[in-house]
Amino acid sequence: MAKGVYFLAFVVLLSTASSLVFAEDPSPLQDICVAIDDHKSETAVFVNGKFCKDLKYAEAKDFFFPGLQNPGNTDNRVGSNVTAVNVDQIPGLNTLGISLARIDFAPYGQNPPHTHPRGTEILVVVEGSLLVGFVTSNTENRLFTKVLNKGDVFVFPIGLIHFQFNVGHSNALAFAALSSQNAGVITIADAVFGSDPPINPDVLAKAFQLDKNIIEELQKKFEY
Ligand SMILES: *[C@@H]1O[C@H](CO)[C@@H](O)[C@H](O)[C@H]1NC(C)=O
C-alpha cells in the first residue's frame, strides 16, 4: 500500500517536472512545419502535435512578412505601439522558437510593465533614447535598469516584468527578438485592474495597500 502511494507521488512529481521543462517552445523535429488552420484539408500533415502544411505546398511567402518599415500608431493612453511578427503573421515560424516585434514610442511614451510568459527578449534601439528595466522575482525584486541610445542592446529574461520608456522628446523606435514563436504578453496593469470579470476590489485593496475606492477607480480606467 505504502509502496503504491510513493509510486503515485513519484509519478505526479515527474509529470509536474516534465510540464515545467516543456513550458517553452520545443525543438523542431523537422526542417519546417508551416502552420495551417485547416487540418482536415489534404494539404496538411500532423507532425509532433502540430498541424503543418504539407511540405510540397510550402512556399517562400510562408516565411515572409512585409511592412515592418511602417510605424505603429502611438496615439493611445501609453504612447507606444508594438507591431508583433510572430507565428500568427509568419506561419513558417511554427516550431522554430523565435519571433520579432517593432516598437514605436511617441515622446515620453512607454511600453508599460509587462511580461512574456514564454520568451526571453533581446531589444535594439534604432532611434531615440529609452529608459528600460526588468525586475527579478520575489527573492530579491532587484531592478536592472539602463538608459539605451541608438544602437544599444538590452536583454529581458523570460517571464520577468520589464518596461521601456521614451525619455527623449522625439519619437523612439526599437526592434525586439523573442525566443518563442509566440512569447505571449501579460501587461500588468491591464491584467490586474482590467480582468474580465474584475478581481474583487477587496483583494486588490489589500494586495496594493490602497483604498478600495482607488481600486475601483483603477478598475474603471482599465475596464475590459
Ligand atoms: C498600433 O498601430 C496599428 C497601425 O497603425 C493600429 O492599427 C493599432 O490600432 C495600434 N494599436 C494601438 C494599441 O494603438
Image (cartoon, helix red, strand yellow):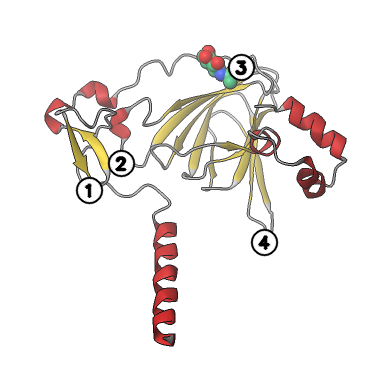
Of the residues under marks 4 and 3, which one precedes in the sequence? 3
| Tag 4: amino acid | Thr
Identify the element where label 2 is drawn: loop
Of the residues under marks 1 and 4, which one precedes in the sequence? 1
Mark 1 Cα-neighbour bin, 10 Å: few <14, some 14–19, many ≥20: few
Give the Cα distance between marks 1 and 3: 40 Å
Mark 2 Cα-neighbour bin, 10 Å: few <14, some 14–19, many ≥20: many
Q: Quadrant of the N terminus?
A: bottom left
Labels 1, 3: front one: 1
Disc 3 C-beta below 8 A from ligand 1: yes
Give the Cα distance between marks 3 and 2: 31 Å
The answer to whether residue 72 is seen in the rendering is no
Residue designated by label 4: 139
> Which of the numbered marks, if any, corresponds to residue 74?
3
Q: Quadrant of ligand 1?
A: top right
- State the image coordinates of residue 109 (x, y, percent, origin top left): 67, 23
Identify the element where label 1 is drawn: loop
Label 2 near label 3: C-beta < 8 Å? no
